[in-house]
Amino acid sequence: MLTIDEDSTRFDVDNSPHAHFFCKRCTHIYDLPLPPGIKYVEGQKMNGHEVAETHLYYKGTCRECLAKK
């Protein structure tokens, strides 16, 4: 379940580790590869805390909307 957009809830069928990009103009959500050095750590410990979820969201203007400018 994605909650990147405050106005709606969406579901992602791809449950492999990846990031999301939300376009503030057209509201489309794109899957993105994880940036180098970023990894999901569910089930691992960080500073004594057990991580249950990791979310990586980017927000901005997608390339399609930028091309329409």
Image: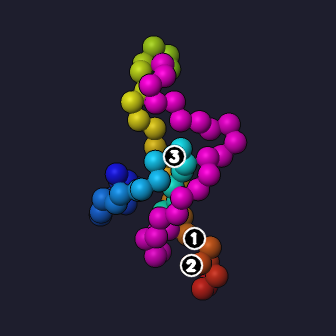
Residue 68 within the segment the image draws in magenta: no
Q: In the rendered view, does 56 fall on the left or right side of 1? A: right
**Residue drawn 46% across the image and 38% down it:** 54
Q: Is residue 52 above or below residue 21?
A: above
- In this figure, which residue is indicated by the disc labeled 3? 16
Write down the residue under mark 1. 62
Residue 41: in magenta span: yes
| Relative side of 8 to 52, left or right | left
User: In the rendered structure, which segment of residues is drawn in magenta?
Assistant: 23-45
Q: Residue 65: give its label.
A: 2
Q: How is the image coloured?
A: rainbow
What residue sits 59% from the left and 56% below the top? 32
Q: Residue furthest right?
A: 36
Kind of residue indicated by mark 2: Cys
User: Residue 18: percent from the left, percent from the top?
Assistant: 55, 48
Q: Where is residue 30 shown, x and y percent of the image?
A: 52, 63
Q: Residue at point 41% right, 21% down?
A: 50
Q: Residue 65 sits in which quadrant?
A: bottom right
Which one is nearer the viewer's eye here, 63 or 17? 17
Q: Amino acid at mark 3?
A: Ser
Q: Secondary structure at mark 2?
A: helix
Mark 3 secondary-structure assignment: loop
Pointers 2 and 1 in contact (CB under 8 A)?
yes
